[in-house]
Image (cartoon, grey):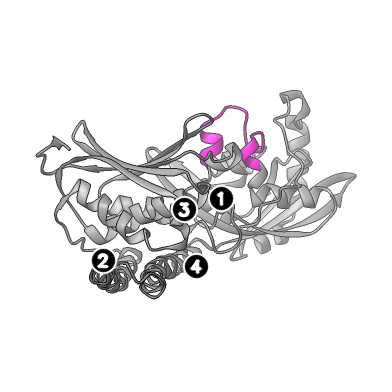
């Protein structure tokens, strides 16, 4: 996804700045009164929209109506794109699509602005849609072009739903991302053997063996992810120990460059619970890696576990803060503050947590730092503080 940092921020306009009902009806008639035009656009396999200068919908073809869950374009007349598609950003606010700081990173908004400015543009946009308590990612590739008709400025948006394509690509990238983490730890351990003759070679050999086994586990886990894609998942649950799971993740990252000159500290209860250890390690490993990357040398990343209301909370905390404009998009597929092909760790956290009947949440505030927490059910609860 492209991040149009230089895009003009669109603030919510007062209602008197929107088109009047009569103006909307007149503009809509430009694109719906001709039988051939309407039927040609409705037969297109992708989305076709026409927006006025306020970014309100004045025409929507059948594909977009179906995507929005509406039977006719007339019911969408005057709506804003994010509002109509139930974008989670507009779901949580009252000021409407395009009015929040977070909206500056929206590709669809950037494309619309370019079209209204007289420039063609192509963007990709991932919208997290809220349907009750369920969130779904919708990824669109959007083309925009300016259109002037009857002394009115419009922008034409054409789009394709590429969610399935992006989902499959994200799963593949996540796999390679995590395999590289493991292989990186093996290389780190091998470098320790070469560069420090006083080190316990048997202990390092044990860690290399452990990391190598986890490479095998990750390859097997990829089969799980493909099963998720095809709705054929069988989660492999076992009885686990909360403190030991965290210790295993820390041990894995101790040999990697990302942990160099940074401290990792565990403060956790010892609780027995049932889960899939491979998926669990992947989620927590991504949390830890992100925290280490965000931490300065000499700083400490804290890991912990506690039990509340029948839920086991496994968390990773560091002192850095995620910028506010990125926070609402942090779990979106294809969204990253680090460049193309990055940011998949947070997406996979959310994806995999649901397979464990859990959820991943985070808090990031100035003066507190950032804590990612995985919450999963506790089937066994033999709790003791250590």
Q: On the image, numbered disc 2 is attached to which residue?
A: 232
Q: Taking 80 as reference, is 342 left or right?
A: left
Q: Is residue 160 magenta?
A: no
Residue under label 3, please give it.
Answer: 261
> With respect to residue 302, does 277 lie above or below?
below
Residue 295 appears in the picture as rendered = yes
Q: Does the magenta stretch mainly form a helix, a strand or a loop?
A: loop
Residue 280 image offset from top left, x and y in percent: 28, 55
Q: Which of 129 and 107 is in front in this view?
A: 107
Q: Is residue 121 left or right of residue 262?
A: right
In front: label 1 or label 3: 3
Residue stretch in magenta: 86-103
Which residue is pictured at 73% across the width and 38% down the height?
Answer: 9
- The kind of secondary structure element at disc 4 is helix
Q: What element carries label 3?
A: loop
The quarter holding residue 52 reads top right
Mark 2, other Cα within 10 Å: few <14 / some 14–19 / many ≥20: few
The single residue placed furthest to the right in the displayed view is 151
| Residue 81 image-quadrant placement | top right
The x and y percentages for residue 140 are 58, 58
Dot 2: what SS? loop
Chain-order first, disc 2 or disc 4: 4
* Residue in the foreground of this view, choosing between 283 and 101: 283
- N-term mark: 3 or 2: 2
Quickly name the residue at label 1.
65
- Residue 165: which disc? 4
């Amino acid at each position: 996804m492209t991040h149009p940092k230089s895009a003009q921020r669109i603030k919510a306009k007062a209602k008197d700045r929107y088109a009047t009902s009569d103006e909307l009806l007149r503009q809509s008639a430009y694109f719906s009164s001709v039988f051939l035009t309407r039927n040609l656009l409705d037969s297109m396999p992708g989305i076709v929209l026409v927006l006025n200068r306020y970014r309100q919908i004045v025409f929507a073809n059948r594909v977009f109506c179906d995507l929005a869950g509406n039977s006719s374009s007339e019911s969408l007349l005057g709506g804003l794109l994010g509002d109509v598609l139930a974008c989670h950003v507009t779901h949580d606010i009252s000021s409407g699509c395009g009015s929040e700081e977070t909206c500056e990173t929206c590709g669809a908004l950037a494309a619309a602005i370019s079209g209204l400015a007289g420039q063609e543009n192509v963007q990709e946009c991932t919208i997290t849609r809220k349907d009750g308590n369920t969130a779904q990612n919708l990824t669109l590739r959007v083309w925009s072009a300016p259109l002037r008709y009857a002394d009115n400025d419009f922008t034409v948006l054409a789009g394709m739903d590429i969610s399935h394509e992006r989902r499959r690509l994200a799963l593949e990238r996540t796999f390679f991302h995590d395999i590289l983490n493991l292989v990186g730890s093996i290389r780190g351990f091998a470098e320790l053997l070469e560069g420090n003759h006083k080190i316990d070679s048997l202990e390092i050999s044990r860690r290399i063996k452990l990391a190598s086994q986890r490479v095998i586990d990750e390859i097997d886990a990829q089969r799980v992810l493909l099963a998720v894609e095809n709705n054929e998942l069988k989660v492999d649950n076992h009885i686990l120990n909360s403190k030991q799971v965290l210790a295993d993740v820390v041990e894995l990252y101790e040999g990697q460059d990302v942990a160099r000159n940074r401290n990792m500290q565990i403060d956790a209860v010892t609780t027995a619970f049932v889960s899939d250890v491979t998926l669990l390690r992947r989620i927590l490993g991504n949390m830890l890696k992100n925290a280490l990357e965000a931490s300065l040398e000499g700083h400490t990343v804290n890991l912990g576990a506690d039990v509340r209301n029948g839920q086991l909370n496994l968390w990773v905390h560091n002192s850095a803060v995620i910028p506010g404009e990125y926070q609402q998009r942090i779990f979106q597929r294809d969204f990253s503050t680090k460049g193309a092909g990055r940011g998949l760790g947070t997406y996979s956290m959310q994806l995999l947590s649901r397979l464990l009947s859990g959820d991943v949440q985070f808090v990031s505030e100035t003066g507190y730092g950032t804590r990612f927490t995985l919450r999963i059910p506790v089937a066994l609860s033999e709790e003791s503080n250590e």
